Each structure stands twice: as structure tokens, then as C-alpha cells.
Amino acid sequence: MNQPILHDNLPLIEVADHLTLDDLYADPRAAQYLLTRLSKTVAVVAPGQMDALLARLRKLGHTPKVLEA
Amino acid sequence: MPRQFDSDLPRVGADMLKPMAKTWGGDSKMRKDECIACIRAGLKDPQKVQAAIASLQPWERNALALIKRMGGIIQHSTLSTSSPISTAPAPRSLAFLERHAERTQSHRHTAQYRLTRESIYRGLESGTTLDELFVRLKTGSQTELPQNVVVELREWNSLRERVVLRRRARLLEFPSARALQDALAQGLTGNSIAERFLLLAHDKQPELQGLTRINYAQALPHNLNVFEDGKIHLNRGTRDLITDAQLSQWAIRLSDLEWQLTVESVSKVLNEGRKIAELLSFLEARSTHSLPSLLKIALRSWAGETYQVELEATIILRCPQEQVFEAIISSQ
């Protein structure tokens, strides 16, 4: 890869603390919606699975801020 | 519709009218109709109204101010309200409370709400900012917001900021961290969220030469060769950010471009509660050809579906001499 790539309409999750993302990857029911981990605190969410991940996060006690972009 | 005070006077008893008439210069010897006439005449005289207001006791002024603020009416000489007793009775305020608090009790004139983490989260998700929330609560409150409430609201807001989901992010991937830094130095703007990744504003179209675009709102290309033995080969074009991870969830990675589905790798995912239909659907959506039938049966079988296969002995008539064989098959 020598040129930049524009990833458009990509579902993402960002967390303030990497331990939160570690915990989510360790939770099989949340991990199924998490794909590539771009950094300690950012991961790609499986397309079409954002609402399912949101529901799982709510069940785990999180109150995520949901943004369109 | 609020009624006029003086229209209600005939319904008020004489014993109550007499002291009221005194405010307007009347005396206790007046009959009821004279009291009413005196009061009505006083109400029409601005000087007498001023004098009457000046003679009100502080508690009387306070009561009138409250009634006015609540849109109250006077009925049968009794001050009463026809709107909810609340410091925020306007429909907008009620809608605000419904959106940001949980109603715990509701009576004819009163309603009780409770601020909870859940209700505040719902309100913030509906677009209210924390500052707006404070302003609205302070405006509708007779007293200062308790400090513990302020602290709790800030805490709930901060917890919401700790996990952010972006439904349709626009992300620019650079070949290296250095390339990203160079682009930023040249004036590209965005939020650097990982070593090689820049989060762009959604309306921002980067002007970079040789830019490749992958749109995740559309189907990704058919670039998987799936074989009968469970081997999967990825014909990599532009490297997207999901395919490798999706394959690695279900199969063992053999090399940069090859994965192997095994009983163990698939069963592990199924044991976590997922369905084999997900895998089949993913492979069918991304495969260059239709999936090998034997692999489909194997995958379903690993998921617990049962198929019957039987061995059976077969009797074969062998004819070493061809003329005998021909005679048999041509026989009527």
C-alpha cells in the first residue's frame, strides 16, 4: 500500500480507556461485532451490526454516545 | 379560560364581600349589591387600584404573583389554579421533563419526576447538551440545583463520552505514520485516531492524489475462492478493514491470503451463540463462485444438522463373454 485509502461509511467504536475495549473483545457476545482493532482504543464494527453492539453495550452497563459520522 | 374576578363577585357571600369592599373605600353597613358595586367601581379606577395594591400585605402580593405565574384563576373568591402546580408548567417544560426524567407519580395537578442515569442518557442522545440541561433545570427550579445533582449529571455525561459509536465514519488510511504526519503538515485536517488513521469530517472530501475509496455502505467485492476442503483464498485488491477480521473469526489463518475452516474453528464460534447461517451468508456474499455443495453440507453438519449416508452391498452380474451380455440386454 503506497497510496492513502479512504474508508467511507465505516462503523467505528472509540473508547476513552483501552481496558474497556479489551473487555469488549473478551466478551464473546460483544466481540462478534468487533472486527479490526485500529489502535488500543479504536476498532471497526461489523457493518450492519451497530445496533446489536449498542444493545450489548447497554446490557453491559455502558451508555455510549452514538454519532452518525 | 380564566374568569374575571369581578364577574364572580355575585357568587361570593356577603360576609366575605364586606371586608373586601373596605379595600375600595366601602364600609361594613353596605348590602351585598352595594359591596359589589363598590368593588367594581374601584377596579375601574386606576388610582384606587394603585392604592389597593399598595395596601396589600406581603403574603397577599406573594400569593397573587404565584397565581399569575401559574396562569391561575379566581373562582368563588378562592384562589385556585387550573394548570399543574409546578415551576415549569408550560407544555415545552413538560415535554422537556418527559424526555429527560422518569415520571414516578402523576396526579391531577402535580407530577413527580426523577432524574436517572438512564433518563439523562436518553435526553442527551436526543440531542440535548449538558449545558442546555443545566439551563433548563435551573430556569424551571425555584431553588438552586443541589450540588450533588450537578456532580451526578456531569458524571453521567462523562460516562457517555467514554464510549463513542460512529455509524458512518470517514477514515483516511495512510501507508505510514510519517505519511499521515506529512499530510497534516500540508494542511489536511481531521482527528488522528490511530497511528495511520485520520478521522475526517463527514462533509470533508480529501484532495489527495491516487486516493482509493472503499464504501462500506455497499457490498464489498466477490474476492474469496472457497474450496471443498474448507480452504479459503482471498484475492486481495485494495485491503479493506473488515474481511481479514471476518475470516479470522471463523477460520484459522494460514498465510496473508489463506484461511482454513475446521471443525474446531467453526464449532468455537458456534459455541459462543452464533449461527452457521451467518458464515454461509458471508461466504456466499463474498465468494467468486457458488459454494461447493460438499462444504455447505460439512458446515451444516458441524453445526449439528444430521445427514444420512449409507453403505449398501450391490450384486453385479459380470459377463466375461460379450455375446452373452448382448443376448441378455437385448432380450424382450
Image (cartoon, coloured by chain):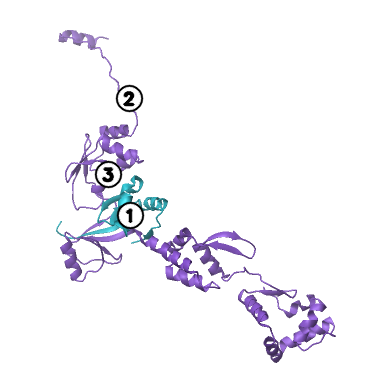
Chain colours: A cyan, B purple
Q: Amino acid at mark 3?
A: Gln
Q: Amino acid at mark 2?
A: Gln
Q: Quadrant of the N terminus of chain A?
A: bottom left
B175 on left or right of B159 = left
Which badge, 3 or 2, comes first in the chain's sequence? 3
- Residue at the spot x=79%, y=80% of the render? B17
Distance from Cα at disc 1 to Cα at disc 2: 47 Å
Residue with the mark numbered 3: B249
- The one nearer the camera, B238 or B32, is B32
Percent position (x, y) of residue B213? 23, 58
Q: Which chain letter goes with mark 1? A: A
Dot label at residue B285: none
B192 on left or right of B30 = left
Residue A46 visible (yes or no): no
Q: How many marks?
A: 3
Task: Please tell me whether residue B330 is drawn above or below residue B278 in the rendered image.
Answer: above
Q: Residues within 10 Å of mark 1 (few under 14, many from 20)?
A: some
Q: Which chain letter goes with mark 2? A: B
Task: Please tell me whether residue B174 is drawn above or below residue B12 in the rendered image.
Answer: above
Name the element at disc 2: loop
Percent position (x, y) of residue B137? 50, 70
Residue with the mark numbered 1: A20
Residue with the mark numbered 2: B308
Distance from Cα at disc 3 to Cα at disc 2: 29 Å
Q: Which chain letter goes with mark 3? A: B
- Residue at the spot x=55%, y=62% of the render? B113
Task: Please tell me whether residue B268 is drawn above or below residue B34 in the rendered image.
Answer: above
Distance from Cα at disc 1 to Cα at disc 3: 20 Å
Q: Quadrant of residue B82?
A: bottom right
B266 on left or right of B180 = right
